[in-house]
Image (cartoon, rainbow, N blue to C red):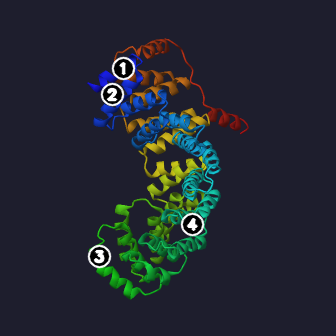
Amino acid sequence: MSLQLAEQYEENEQYDKAYEEYKKSYETNPKDLGLLERLGHIAMMLGKKDEASEYYSAILEMDATNVMAYEQLMDIYVTTDKFKYYIYRGNMHSVMHQLEHAINDFKKALTHTADNEEAQCSTRFVLGSLYEQVGNNVKAIDEYLKILDFDHTHEEVYKKLANLYLSENAVGSAIETLERARKEGFDTESIKEDLAKLYLKNNQPELAKDITNDDLLRIKCLLALGDRNEAFSEIQKCKEKYIGNSDFYVIKAQYYYEEKEFDKALENVIEYEKFQPNTALGFQMKALIYEGKQDDYNAHINWGKYNLARGNKDIAVNDLLNAYQLKDDDADLIHSLAILLESTGEKNHAIEFYEKLYKLEPTNKTALKKLAEFRESIGDYATQVEYLEKLLETDKRNSVLIRQIAEKYEKLRNKPEAVKYYQKYLSITGDSPETEPIRRKLAKLENTEMAQEEGLIDKIMRFFNKGN
């Protein structure tokens, strides 16, 4: 009843009474966003800005993307608290994905923090995160470094700073940051494990081994130190615990690779790929193992896949061409090369491989389609239609393809074949408004005399043969 009464009071412009009734409803429905909006709105009308701020803040706790709430809070603080005003404006621009505007807002908020260290820290933290989002790592690093000058620092600041240094290939700076975190009281498991990974990455496995409590990282350290016996002992201890863990199979593969037990190494890479398929790491490990087995063909194949996974298409092409030189009858390889060459803009080279694929697999639909498209592009319609007819043999009731062949024969002015394929098209599609234009075309075609036309290639060949 309170809600209905509140609405009635509001309609009658009795806002004080409406406000009290809305508050009664709010006590029993504190998660009602619509009710919070009404309370905030009427509180603003009554000049109760502090209470309105509480209601709009409550809305944001439940819906951090509510632009209306940010706008209302901005109105509340625009003349009384510039820091809060710019913070809310920055948050609004952030949820609207206007990150550059948000950055400017938080920079302005900083000018109103005075000696409030906590406000400066929180504002700079958000600024740092925004700079990360727009890809300006240098400015993000600068903001996080400034936070470290204050007492109100958090472990997360050190971790973010270390990750940024790492993304900039400054491993030494990342290590110094986490070492500083430990010295300044953040000697947590999380910091130590992150630091151990960095030590290992920086070829300092002994330091990593001393601080890690991670079984798998410890084994990696032992392998890096060349202590394969102890590493194998740890692997045996852990094998039940880490069944199904993809990293464990990587470590086992590394151990067997270093022991030159290449078949066992390969078995573990295959297990890894069950959990992490088509990764650069998986292809790289396979390539190295095949090199160890002196299997150059499969090594080149996997180096190609590795570079492709990393986006290095030109290098991948060279790797796969090297594999092709060793084995020129692998249809999968030839197909991959054709697709890859086409994606890099080498269309003529790609067509060579589609032709090779067609010779190996005469019913390969992709090869037939690509060869037909190529012949059309150079005006060789006669050969194009030959490929289309071979393609039709793989899908004999494909009405779209039948119509295309009919149109090509019509273009070549080959009336008998054009009529045959238009009739075939109609026999499959039946009577419908969509086929009526084809029926009219067929009727006209059957009553038209037509001399067969040469294709462009035929004309060129006839021209050169004149001199013979």
The residue at the far right in this view is 467
The answer to whether marks 2 and 1 mark residues whose Cβ atoms lie closer than 8 Å is yes
The span from disc 2 to disc 4 (Cα, nearest Å) is 57 Å
Circle 2 sits on which residue?
21
Q: Residue shown at 45%/61% (left/top)?
A: 279
Q: How crowded is mark 2: few (under 14 residues within 10 Å), some or many (20 or more)?
A: many
Q: Is residue 410 above or below residue 351?
A: above
Disc 1 marks a residue whose amino acid type is Tyr
Of pointers 3 and 1, the one earlier in the residue sequence: 1
Which residue type does callout 2 highlight? Glu
Q: Which residue is drawn at 38% across and 75% down?
A: 214
The answer to whether mark 4 and mark 1 are in CB contact below 8 A is: no
Does label 3 or label 4 sit earlier along the sequence? 4
Residue 230 image offset from top left, x and y in percent: 37, 87
For label 4, the residue is 166
Q: Distance between the residues labelled 2 and 1?
A: 9 Å
Instruction: Depth check: give the residue in front, 4 or 404.
Output: 4
The amino acid pointed to by label 3 is: Lys
In front here: 358 or 150?
Answer: 150
In-front residue for pair 422/161: 161
| Disc 3 crowd, CA 10 A, few/some/many (<14, 14-19, 20+) | some
Q: How crowded is mark 1: few (under 14 residues within 10 Å), some or many (20 or more)?
A: some
Where's the N terminus, which quadrant? top left
Measure the alpha-carbon separation of dots 3 and 2. 65 Å
Q: Can residue 327 be seen in this view?
A: no
Sequence-wise first label, 4 or 1: 1
